[in-house]
Image (tube, rainbow, N blue to C red):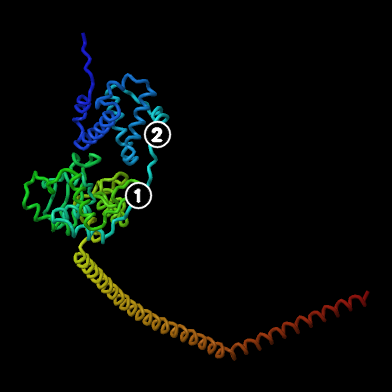
Amino acid sequence: MRVKLERSRNTFMARMTTKDYKTIRGYNVAINNFENFCMEKYGKADFVSELKNYESDDIFDVLQLWINWNAKLSPSTTKTLFSRIKKYLYHRGIKLHQQDINEELEFRTLIQEERYGLTLDDIQTILKAMRYKHKVQFMCQLSSLMRIGELTQLRKKHLIADKQNIIVKIPATIAKLKKGRTTFFSKEASRLLRPLLREIDDDDLVFSVKAETSVAQVLRRVLVKTGLDMKYESSGDYMINTHSFRAYGITKLSRLDPNFAKKIAGQKGYLDQYDRITDDEKLILYQKFEDELIIDNSEKQKAEIKKLESENYELERLQSKINTLEDSEKKHNEKMNKALVDQYKMFKEEMSNVISNFYDDLAQKRQEEFDNLPKRKMNFKSKMATDMTTMTTDKAKQEHDKLVKKLKKSKK
């Protein structure tokens, strides 16, 4: 006889062992929340066994009561908890169809307030009130655009510290989307981090704290201390949180190169052009925008001075190149002008010779005609005399013929 094993929370969590620890923790939080509700309402934490015997409508009534019980949570948090509980209930034998969920359950509408934009003054005030280690941690997060969950799991062996900018090789196992990537710490953050790295081994966590909540608590205490503990009216959440530092870096780089910002931040939607370049090429691109991520005013001034010096050098180089081109053009023009003048002189000389030869030939021709004029005149007179003689002879003959004809007529 086949024995059917009863599914429970333990069997469900056993199935989750292949997931990363953050996912497992998320399911534990959701189930704990649901069991606390069941204990309060029905006097039993593991109420799922009884819930399986309820009619479909009654099951949705219980779930709606649970949603309402979580009214203090944000709508997005409640929906996240429900998505996990739905998977848990499916494992326990309660199958919920999406169309029924849409028709039977009502979630509060998410109120989207305008997000607070962290300023450089805010960052400087916050970091000034922090201990050295925490200050470095948030500067590293801001300059690398890393998620706080990734940063807290970062180990020394994930860093390449042989350049001014420390290269960060985020392994897929700790990345949110399970896709490894490369990012960088700014030179400012790298300089402050190196003393901490000398005190730890390769397998040690860089910032010694693996829990994100601990980092968030540190930040909240500093916010209260500095008077920057503003909260959103709808949710009561702090306007400044650990994500604010990452968002600041993303905003700064996105204004210069949105795709590169998404790439090193590990966001979806970037073009794959940056997947085909080396780490050194990425670093050169990062350094091009790095000045936007500097926090310390003195470092910022140094960077601006260096940038101005670089720009001045570039301007001087361009001016020198322009002067060289102008000199070259001037010499070329002088050479061309001289060539044109020489060509004009040659042309003028040639034309003068042509005109002179033309008039010489014309004069010679006219002289020859003048010299031949008496001869032509004599030839003319001779011709005229011949013509006159010929004409006289012809006329006399004509008269003779007329006379002969006349005599012949008279004889008849």
Does label 1 or label 2 sit earlier along the sequence? 2
Classify mark 1: helix, strand or loop: loop
Q: Position of residue 250 (x, y in %)?
A: 28, 52
Q: Is 186 in front, or is 297? A: 297
Can you tell which mark lies on residue 165? Answer: none
- Considering the image in quadrants, where does the N terminus appear? top left
Q: Residue at x 18, y 60 (%)?
A: 128
Whether the residues at callouts 1 and 2 have beta carbons within 8 Å, the answer is no
- Considering the image in quadrants, where does the C terminus appear? bottom right
For the residues marked 1 and 2, what is the alpha-carbon distance in whole angstroms? 22 Å
Q: Position of residue 269 (x, y in %)?
A: 32, 45
Q: Position of residue 312 (x, y in %)?
A: 25, 71
- Report whether 193 appears left or right of 223: left
Q: Is 368 in front, or is 123? A: 123
Task: Tell me where residue 12 sits by quadrant.
Answer: top left
User: What is the crowding at mark 2: few (fewer than 14 residues within 10 Å), some, or many (at least 20)?
Assistant: few
Residue 294 appearing in the image: no
User: What is the crowding at mark 1: few (fewer than 14 residues within 10 Å), some, or many (at least 20)?
Assistant: few
- Amino acid identity at mark 2: Glu
* Up/down of 344 relative to 5, above or below: below
- Amino acid identity at mark 1: Glu
* Up/down of 177 relative to 196, above or below: above
Q: Badge 1 is on which residue?
A: 233
Residue 119 appearing in the image: yes
Q: Position of residue 342 (x, y in %)?
A: 36, 82
Q: Badge 2 is on which residue?
A: 106
